[in-house]
Image (cartoon, helix red, strand yellow):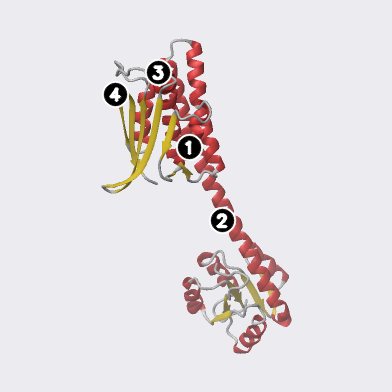
Amino acid sequence: MKAVSNTPITILLLEDSDFDTELISEHVRQVSPEPEIVRAIGRRDYVEALESGRCDVILSDYSLPGFDGMAALDLAIEKAPNTPFIFVSGVLGEEIAIESFKKGATDYVLKQRLMRLPAAVDRALAESRERVERRRAEEQLKLLVAELSHRVKNTLAMVMSIVRRTASRSRTVDDYEEALTSRLRALSDAHALLFESNWGETNLRQVLERTLHPFRPGQGGDIGISGPDVTLEPKAALALSLIFHELVTNALKFGALSTESGKVAIEWKKITEGAGPLIEFVWRESGGPLVEAPSEAGFGHTLIARSAEYELDGEARIGFEPTGLICEIQFAAA
């Protein structure tokens, strides 16, 4: 329906009498703003008007030559189910009125009391708008529930994977508890940030700062951050929070941040390449212990690579240079 309080409406009037049409039109013009009236006399032009989708309210006589009001109501329910239908008739018995309401009529007005018609039209429109808004709210709620279910399933799958892989790489129960708690806290912090943005787009710098905050010993110069504003979709924000967590915890345990002289330089930029813009993110460590490539990839390395590939639709490269670890990640810009 197009009708709102300050927008002219279109009324479809099914009436065979010229005299009654003039009387009804005169009363209906009291509706503000003044509506457009489309008259139909028989079944054919009535159906054509319904199929045009232009009418906001239907006014119908009950007794028509070769075509009765109940048939008109059935057609309205079939072709314009959300449009209010009001009988305007000289005679409409109580039984017929009750039957019409059961079938879906909105109201009825006797031709002897046409002064009721403007109020009946306004009330029918208001009730119709309320039904439309309620259906829209219900549909929105269904979409939100479906989206929430999808996100919860994805999050639980991620948690289960973290639990299993952390267990397989832990040597002791204490190691397992510490590593698992730390990773789940990073995931929780990312969810908190997304909640603050109402699960909309968030900022790469915000995700990075939120992830690094528990590990930074104040405002020292051990971690340098540089890069333009980059917006992230929720899925990318969650993946990057876990990647950043793995990088910073590894740097604290084995890399540059395990020594007082160590530094981490974090930079990112937007580049245009191929099908669309990309984000190029670089984590570069220096000043820490001598770095040697491990004999096999650990869980952190695997998590970074798989998160970049499957969650960011990008790629990650980790280099174990003697001067320090370098992690380069490319992924599509939002």
Task: Name the residue nearer the viewer: 184 or 129.
Answer: 184
Q: Residues within 10 Å of mark 4 (few under 14, many from 20)?
A: some
* Sequence-first tag of 3 and 1: 1
Q: Is residue 328 above or below residue 124?
A: above
* Sequence-first tag of 4 and 1: 1
Indicate the secondary structure of the residue bearing disc 1.
Answer: helix
Q: Is residue 131 above or below residue 159?
A: below
Residue 283 in which image quadrant: top left
Q: Which residue is mark 4?
A: 321
* Sequence-first tag of 3 and 2: 2
Task: Report if residue 106 is visible in the image.
Answer: no
Disc 3 or disc 1, which is closer to the eye? 3
Q: CA distance from mark 4 to mark 1?
A: 27 Å
Q: Residues within 10 Å of mark 3 (few under 14, many from 20)?
A: some
Q: Which residue is mark 2?
A: 136
Indicate the secondary structure of the residue bearing disc 3.
Answer: loop
Task: Name the residue nearer the viewer: 149 or 52.
Answer: 149
Residue 128 in which image quadrant: bottom right
Point out residue 98 in the picture as x, y percentages from the top left corner. Answer: 69, 66
Q: How many marks?
A: 4
Residue drawn at (60%, 86%) of the image: 17
Residue drawn at (61%, 56%) of the image: 134
Q: Spot the residue most to the left.
A: 274
**Badges 2 and 1: C-beta atoms under 8 Å apart?**
no
**Badges 4 and 1: C-beta atoms under 8 Å apart?**
no
Residue 254 image label: 3
User: Which amino acid type corresponds to the residue marked 1 in the rendered image?
Assistant: Val
Q: CA distance from mark 4 to mark 2?
A: 57 Å
Point out residue 324 in the picture as x, y percentages from the top left corner. Answer: 33, 24
Q: Which residue is mark 1?
A: 207
User: Which amino acid type corresponds to the residue marked 3 in the rendered image?
Assistant: Phe
